[in-house]
Amino acid sequence: MITLVLGGVRSGKSEVAEQLAGPGPGTYLATGLVAPGDDDFADRVARHRSRRPASWATVEETRAVPAVLARLHGLVLLDALGPWIANDIARADIDGLVEALRRRPGDTVVVSEEVGLGVHPVTEVGRLFADRLGEANRRVAEVADHCLLVVAGRIIELLAGEASGVGCAAPGPPPPTPHAPAHVPGTRHPAEALPPFPSGPTGAGRPRPLSASPPAAAGPTGDGPGSPSAPPPVPTRASGLSLGQAVAFLTPLGGAVQPSPSALAWFPVVGAMLGLGLGGIWWAADHRLGALAAAALVVVADLAATGALHFDGLLDSADGLLPHLPPARRLAVMADPHVGAFAVAVGAGALLLRTASLAAFGSARPWLLAALWSLARTAMAVTALTGRYARPGGLASAFLRGSDGEPAGRGVSWAIVAALGTMLAVGLALADQPASVLAVLVAALAAGGVAALARRRIGGFTGDTLGAAAVVAETAGLLVAVAVVR
């Protein structure tokens, strides 16, 4: 979900955005550039920093905002577009910003200055800044799910015009999400219920945080399900069992799709398809390139076929789960795009082990790869169906039953997914060699170990830990297979 929060100078737009984002965890993407001697702006930046919850990671980027935004996971609060435009008026990549907002899976709150509420420019550079910022605001509004205007601390929801038919979608309150808002001075305490925005172009109210759950049924005049002001459910691109959703979630193919829980049933099949494809590359390259070069090519092809998403999850999980950190800090570290020492060590070790294992076989084994890759995705699906989601929001939260972070438990049975995935993986292993079944068993235990570590360290799973479990399972399975079937 994309939410644009507009307002004039000192209107309270940043406080509203922070309240909407809630206590996190998430990433605060700051664009302000403090020039030497600008004590006033330095004081403003310091005030912003002081009121951010400890669970939020802060990333400061003054120019390459689209590239950084595209790499961030989970909830992001981008504050603000005005300083970003001012830092590089002519070359600020508005197209890139819009594309990053459209494609990233997590929720994004964007803060910007409404140029019509500011000082009117009298110089050429001032007019250029106003034009570029106005263009940026309009372009972001076109792809935003909700647009809010903050005037003197009061909030107005902006609706799309009938002629445009795009952006800042239809009348009605923004859909809520799971946690209570951070307390903002002058507003109600987080424990108090926040009323949704009244419908209509001039309705003023308070925002529900992106992670706040909807109220339960409250009778004919309440905000419960079926009432006129009840927020609509967030739709997925498709319903029911969807191979396309599973492919889009596990690979770069199909674009950014918010998958339904039933898509998990297809994870073992997608894993088998990936493994067979990589096995075909292995078989074709082995005769021409030699064992080592063919193994390296398969490892690189796997990164390309998965968009390096699982490997990125391994790196983030290594930095978040392995050091001694408090739980809230672990999640913030995992959301930070920067790579730490644990990630470098674990990532390099995984690449070396995977390449060496494949080279050690001496000949291609496509059925073995299909078995291990299928088992790894089966483990991801079972973890998502039985575990607790550790974040308040994110793409993998689409697998949940509701807003409390608990597993989906409906639409597809974890036992059925586990049984079908295990049968598929074991069958493929038997097609390779009976002893390969042991490699499948060890891969399952390795994935369970990662899930158990995540549950202990952060209280559940995230999309990163699912990816890490897949990579660890595949690597452990390859090592065992080398030992027993080579």
Image (cartoon, rainbow, N blue to C red):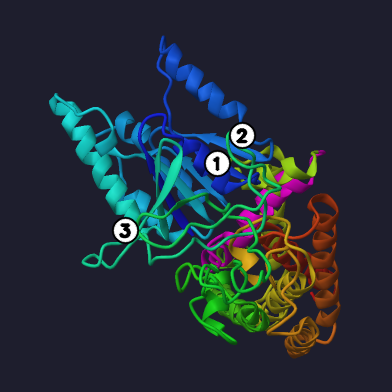
User: Residue 293 appears in which quarter of the rendering?
Assistant: bottom right
Q: Is residue 238 magenta?
A: no
Secondary structure found at label 1: helix
Is 291 or 450 nearer to us in this picture?
450
Magenta-drawn segment: 299-324
Residue 246, quarter of the rendered image? bottom right
Mark 3 vs mark 1: give the one in front: 1
**Three-letter residue code for mark 2:** Arg
Q: Which residue is mark 3?
A: 142
Q: Is residue 360 above or below residue 408?
A: above
Instruction: Identify which residue, 412 or 203, lies in the foreground.
Output: 203
Distance (Cα) linking label 2 and label 3: 29 Å
Position of 383 compared to 123: left or right?
right
- The quadrant in which residue 276 appears is bottom right
Residue type at mark 3 is: Glu
* Secondary structure of the residue carrying numbered label 3: helix
Q: In terms of secondary structure, what is the magenta stretch mainly? A: helix
Residue that carries the numbered disc 2 in the rendered image: 52
